[in-house]
Image (tube, grey):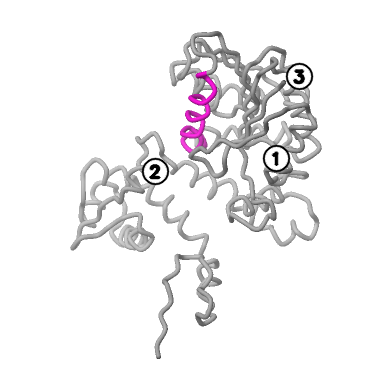
């Protein structure tokens, strides 16, 4: 009698009853390679050339990119194995996935995010064993002096990752204020993606973007590029210190609680409560693991990233964040499905 097992995807555990092998350990050990290969292809415009010129041979790609045929062959074949390119006979072509996310002219381009991970994150992670020993980060990014320079380098690269979710949020909340003035405060604004989505959705929306001065300069520049610079003003300063003002209908906190840590996050939520008008909504984007903190992998890996880069940062579950919101005075804590790593968390000020 023979038995068959269902094939598993890379990184997934073997089915019950299957032989135990070191396959996953070996895959994990080579986990550094795919993002570096993707970055090399992005920097040599491989995806852009294939997007504009269609399927091409190795020699054609070498002429178009100026890269060596030996170097290109290695990364092209690897990208075929990673299912980010296809090859028919001797011609390479994009897949729907790479055509959507790795062509630099496309609105959902994620190549900048990959470069950020390789260039700014990977080196700090090399010290993980020592960081686990001391509990102290390799680099403190939640400090204005060092953090502003860190975030200034890559906030624009995060815009395509968050833009689809920001548009879903804007569509969901702006309908309530259709045709009416709407004040939105975008906290830790970065590229300004959350506020920009509201400004694009509603001509009546006025955005106040809060971030460190050096980052706020980027926010304003991006808003101008998106054609909404006249309706987005910046409020430079530290989240915990700057006066937000009052009377906002919406407050967005896009991926900031994880670096603030629990104590500062709870203080921040109370401050946001005071800034909102009655009936106003707070919207939080975060990497949230399940209630038992056993899955999914990305939020849990990001929790380690907070260990590497902050003194108090972490990832928090939906029940944890919900309890902080209720403690601050919010009600109707709920989740909104969006094209993001985790559902958005919304709550209302009574």
Q: Is residue 166 magenta?
A: yes
**Nearest-to-viewer mark from 2 and 3:** 3
Q: Rate crowding at label 3 as few (under 14), some (14 to 19) or many (20 or more) other CA atoms within 10 Å.
A: some
Percent coordinates x, y for residue 7 in the rendering: 42, 71
Quadrant including the N terminus: bottom left
Percent coordinates x, y for residue 238 in the rendering: 73, 25
Name above or below for residue 56 compared with residue 113. below
Q: Rate crowding at label 2 as few (under 14), some (14 to 19) or many (20 or more) other CA atoms within 10 Å.
A: some
* Residue marked by disc 1: 259
Of the image marks 2 and 3, the number of the one nearer the N terminus: 2
Please report the bounds of the magenta region as a residue range: 158-175
Q: Which one is in front, 7 or 207?
A: 7
Question: Marks 1 and 3, how far apart in space?
Answer: 22 Å
**Nearest-to-viewer mark from 1 and 3:** 3
Q: Quadrant of residue 133?
A: bottom right
* Residue marked by disc 2: 101
Question: Marks 1 and 2, how far apart in space?
Answer: 27 Å
* Residue marked by disc 3: 274
Q: Rate crowding at label 1 as few (under 14), some (14 to 19) or many (20 or more) other CA atoms within 10 Å.
A: many
Q: Are marks 1 and 2 in contact (CB under 8 Å)?
A: no
Left or right, residue 42 beside residue 334:
left
Q: Check disc 2 and report its element: helix, strand or loop.
A: helix
């Amino acid at each position: 009698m023979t038995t068959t097992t269902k094939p598993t995807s890379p990184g997934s555990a073997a089915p019950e009853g299957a032989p135990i092998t070191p396959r996953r350990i070996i895959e994990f050990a080579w986990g550094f390679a795919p993002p570096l290969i993707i970055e090399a292809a992005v920097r040599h415009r491989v995806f852009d050339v294939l997007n504009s010129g269609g399927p091409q041979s190795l020699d054609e790609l070498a002429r178009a990119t100026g890269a060596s045929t030996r170097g290109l062959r290695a990364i092209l074949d690897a990208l075929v194995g990673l299912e980010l390119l296809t090859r028919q006979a001797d011609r390479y072509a994009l897949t729907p996935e790479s055509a959507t996310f790795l062509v630099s002219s496309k609105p959902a381009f994620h190549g900048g995010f990959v470069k950020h991970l390789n260039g700014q994150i990977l080196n700090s992670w090399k010290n993980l064993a020592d960081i686990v020993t001391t509990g102290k980060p390799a680099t403190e990014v939640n400090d204005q002096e060092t953090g502003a320079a860190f975030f200034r380098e890559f906030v624009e690269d995060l815009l395509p990752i968050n833009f689809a979710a920001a548009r879903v949020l804007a569509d969901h909340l702006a309908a309530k204020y259709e045709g009416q003035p709407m004040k939105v405060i975008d906290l830790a604004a970065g590229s300004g993606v959350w506020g920009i989505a509201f400004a694009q959705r509603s001509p009546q929306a006025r955005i106040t973007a809060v971030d460190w001065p050096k980052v706020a300069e980027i926010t304003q520049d991006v808003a101008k590029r998106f054609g909404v610079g006249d309706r987005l003003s910046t409020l430079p300063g530290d989240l915990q210190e700057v006066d937000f003002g009052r009377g906002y209908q919406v407050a967005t906190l896009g991926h900031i609680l994880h670096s603030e840590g629990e104590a500062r996050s709870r203080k921040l939520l109370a401050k946001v409560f005071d800034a909102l008008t009655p009936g106003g909504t707070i919207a939080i984007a975060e990497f949230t693991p399940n209630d038992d903190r056993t899955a999914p992998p990305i939020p849990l890996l990001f929790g380690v990233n907070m260990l590497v880069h902050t003194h108090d940062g972490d990832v928090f579950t939906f029940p944890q964040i919900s309890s902080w919101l209720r403690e601050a005075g919010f009600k109707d804590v709920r989740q909104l499905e969006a094209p993001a790593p985790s559902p958005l968390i919304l709550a209302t000020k009574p």
